């Protein structure tokens, strides 16, 4: 059986509750690990989620962490609540999700590069200068 672990970092702007954790967790960044196994019966590579864990500060010791098994839907609900709670803040925040794009999809690498460019380069440039890079190129400068 072929297995893999996908790690990601999720952020919370405010303290939050998560099913499976019996206390309020502080705002901040959290590592989430998802274990998946290859589905052998298919003619193309596809994986099924086996487990999802979040690493949280241990309740008993400040420098320790504990790994808690969670349902990814509960994590998404907690993130949605955090976003809604933050909606009244004066600071802006953008959250984008490309649903359906999975690492095993053929275009994943190029799609990921494209999204990273448009979110980190083009959107930032649009927000800071008023002109983004919608076609992936720097805007032409006009000759005087």
Image: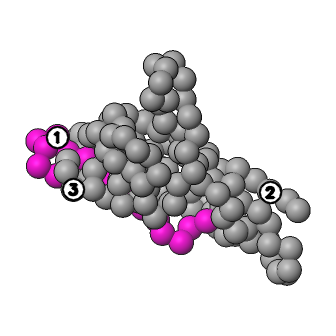
**First in residue order: circle 3 vs circle 1:** 3
Q: Nearer the viewer's eye, disc 3 or disc 1?
A: 3
- In the image, the segment drawn in magenta is 87-102
Residue for point 51% across, 60% down? 71
| Separation of marks 3 and 1 at Cα, in angstroms | 13 Å
Helix, strand or loop: magenta stretch: loop
Residue 135: image quadrant is bottom left
- Compared across the picture, whether 12 is left or right of 131 comes to right
Foreground of the two, 11 or 63: 63
Which of the numbered marks, if any, corresponds to residue 3? 2
Q: State which quarter of the image contains the C terminus.
A: top left
Q: Which of marks 1 and 2 is in front?
A: 2
Q: Residue 84 carries which label?
A: 3
Residue matched to label 1: 91
* Crowd rating for badge 2 (residues with CA inside 10 Å; few <14, some 14–19, many 20+): few
Lower sequence index among marks 2 and 3: 2
> How far apart are the alpha carbons under marks 1 and 2?
41 Å
Looking at the picture, tell me which residue is in the foreground, 140 or 36: 36
Identify the residue at horizontal 69%, vertical 55% (top origin): 35
């Amino acid at each position: 059986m072929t297995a893999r672990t996908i790690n990601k970092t999720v952020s919370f702007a405010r303290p939050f509750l998560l099913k499976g954790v019996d206390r309020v967790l502080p705002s901040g960044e959290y590592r989430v690990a998802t274990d998946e196994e290859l589905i052998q019966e298919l003619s193309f590579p596809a994986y099924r989620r086996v487990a999802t864990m979040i690493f949280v500060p241990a309740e008993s010791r400040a420098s320790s962490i504990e790994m808690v098994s969670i349902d990814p839907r509960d994590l998404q609900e907690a993130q949605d609540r955090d976003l809604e709670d933050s909606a009244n803040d004066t600071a802006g925040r953008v959250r984008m999700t490309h649903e359906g794009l999975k690492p095993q999809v053929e275009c994943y690498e190029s799609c990921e590069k494209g999204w990273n460019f448009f979110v980190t380069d083009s959107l930032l440039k649009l927000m800071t200068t008023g002109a983004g890079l919608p076609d992936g190129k720097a805007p032409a400068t006009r000759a005087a």
